[in-house]
């Protein structure tokens, strides 16, 4: 298996969903499409990583709320394990921090669970073709954030030091100040101080706008 297709040239999909009824429903929907092959299903992050290492699916659909961790962290780890796997977040959670955290972690799409079965399959087609896929409500909020970043009418130089860049990237990944301090081996007070400077230099007011700026300016590549 080459990591891009399942059996018989079909697109291999891994379903990561903690609720058995929803997991079975997703499997039934995807198995009806002749071009998709459900390689496996997982209810936990640990199981998802094990199956990803085994199957190297082309696409993984993923809930962000899992019993043994965050889907955002799982997405980040999965992308390191299997970079060619496209991650589609399929969740009922749509707060800005989670959305931007997931995109920053490498997700190629973010759709909500009110999506129709037909639209879900179309979303998988989009990812398969190398396109991004966002739920309309999520897309509107992202565009709004970009507009707010660009449209404040206040000058900023956007120049960041190496440490400030590291902090900005961690914010875009959805990390808290405590997590940033631990990952970068600095104090929380230093994180808070540097973060205020980052906000001022790139011309944003909060973490969500900072995440939007980081994604738009290519800091997450």
Image (spheres, grey):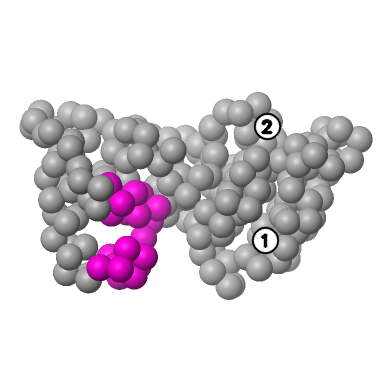
- Residue occupying the point 30% across, 68% down: 185
Whether residue 177 appears in magenta in the rendering, the answer is yes
Left or right: 66 in relation to 12: left
- Residue occupying the point 28% across, 54% down: 167
Dot label at residue 128? 2
Residue 127 in the image: x percent, y percent? 63, 33
Left or right: 182 in relation to 203: right
Residue 65 vertical position relative to residue 136 in the rendered view, above or below: below
- Residue occupying the point 58% across, 67% down: 66
Q: Which residue is mark 1?
A: 49
Whether residue 143 appears in magenta in the rendering, the answer is no
Which span of residues is magenta-colored? 165-186
- Which residue occupies the foreground of this view, 109 or 140? 109
The residue carrying pointer 1 sits among few (fewer than 14), some (14 to 19) or many (20 or more) residues within 10 Å by Cα, namely many
Spatial CA distance of label 2 from label 1 is 20 Å
Location of the N terminus by quadrant is top right
Residue 157 in the image: x percent, y percent? 13, 33
């Amino acid at each position: 298996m080459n990591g891009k297709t399942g059996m018989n040239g079909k697109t291999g999909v891994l379903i990561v969903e903690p609720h058995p009824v929803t997991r079975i429903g997703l499997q039934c929907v995807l198995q009806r499409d002749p071009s998709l092959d459900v390689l496996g299903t997982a209810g936990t992050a640990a199981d998802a990583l094990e199956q990803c290492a085994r199957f190297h699916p082309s696409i993984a659909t993923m809930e962000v709320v899992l019993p043994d961790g965050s889907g955002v962290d799982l997405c980040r780890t999965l992308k390191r394990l299997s970079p060619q796997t496209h991650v589609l977040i399929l969740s009922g959670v749509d707060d800005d921090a989670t959305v931007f955290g997931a995109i920053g972690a490498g997700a190629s799409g973010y759709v909500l669970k009110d999506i129709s079965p037909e639209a879900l399959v179309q979303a998988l087609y989009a990812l398969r073709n190398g396109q991004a896929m966002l739920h309309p409500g999520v897309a509107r909020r992202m565009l709004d954030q970009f507009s707010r970043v660009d449209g404040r009418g206040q000058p900023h130089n956007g120049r960041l030091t190496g440490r400030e860049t590291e902090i900005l990237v961690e914010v875009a990944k959805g990390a808290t100040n405590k997590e940033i301090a631990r990952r970068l081996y600095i104090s929380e007070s230093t994180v808070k101080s540097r973060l205020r400077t980052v906000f001022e230099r790139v011309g944003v007011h909060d973490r969500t706008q900072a995440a939007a700026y980081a994604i738009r300016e290519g800091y997450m590549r």
